[in-house]
Amino acid sequence: MTIAFLLLRYFSFNENEYKVFKNAVSPTPTNLIGFALGEDGPFLAVNLLKFKEKAEYEDGRLTTLSGQEAYSIYANEVQNHLAKVGAKVILGGEVNRLILGEVEELWDVVAVAWYPSRKAMIDMATSKDYIESEKHRKAGLAGQLNIEVIESEFNFQ
């Protein structure tokens, strides 16, 4: 056996090992179209959140808030927005450590919300009240991953 063959055999190659995971604050048009065209039904939105050290508002206002403090304002307000469309936060907490895998930098917080449908999320995200609250989200977030998990044999309600 050659050294190359032994190395290939020794190291298990997983296609995810070489993918780049990039945080974002807003979805791309491709993300939005894919979401809107997907099959409707209940789902979970798993949010991996990374905060800015200091909040930065788009309107340029001066603030002493940290990114996490600005996001907390959004998180408190979003509870009402979720309730209006029949959705709810079902889990949230600070990231303590990575148990398995490898990433360059850990997220700060994980939050999981349950939505009754895609339409519910779209209705919420396009409402005037939500858009007003979103300024705090954008001010506080360095970026996030938002992962859609569809309901299967598990009952999330």
Image: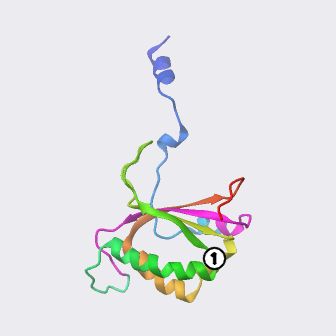
Q: What's the magenta region? A: 34-57
Q: Position of residue 19 (x, y in %)?
A: 49, 46
Q: Position of residue 58 (x, y in %)?
A: 38, 82
- Residue 62, relative to residue 68: is it above or below? below
Q: Is residue 69 left or right of residue 127?
A: left
Q: Position of residue 8 (x, y in %)?
A: 49, 24
**The residue tagged with tag 1: helix, strand or loop?**
helix
Can the viewer see residue 125 in this picture?
no
Q: At 50% from the left edge and 70% from the top edge, which residue is drawn? A: 26
Where is residue 40, by image quadrant? bottom right
Q: Amino acid at mark 1?
A: Ile
- Residue 143, relative to residue 70: is it above or below? above
Q: At 33% from the left edge and 77% from the top edge, which residue is drawn? A: 56
10, 5: nearer the viewer: 10
Q: Is residue 141 left or right of residue 54?
A: right
Q: At 33% from the left edge and 72% from the top edge, which residue is drawn? A: 67
Check if residue 41 falls in the magenta segment: yes
- Residue 155, relative to residue 14: is it above or below? below
Q: Position of residue 9 (x, y in %)?
A: 51, 21
Within 10 Å of disc 1 (Cα), the crowding (few <14, some 14-19, many 20+) is some
- Outermost residue on the top side: it is 1
Check if residue 108 falls in the magenta segment: no
77, 105: nearer the viewer: 77
- The colour scheme is rainbow
- Number of numbered tags placed on the structure image: 1
Q: At 66% from the left edge and 65% from the top edge, which residue is drawn? A: 157
Can the viewer see residue 80 in this picture?
yes
Residue bearing mark 1: 122
Q: Is residue 5 left or right of residue 85?
A: left
- Outermost residue on the bottom side: it is 128
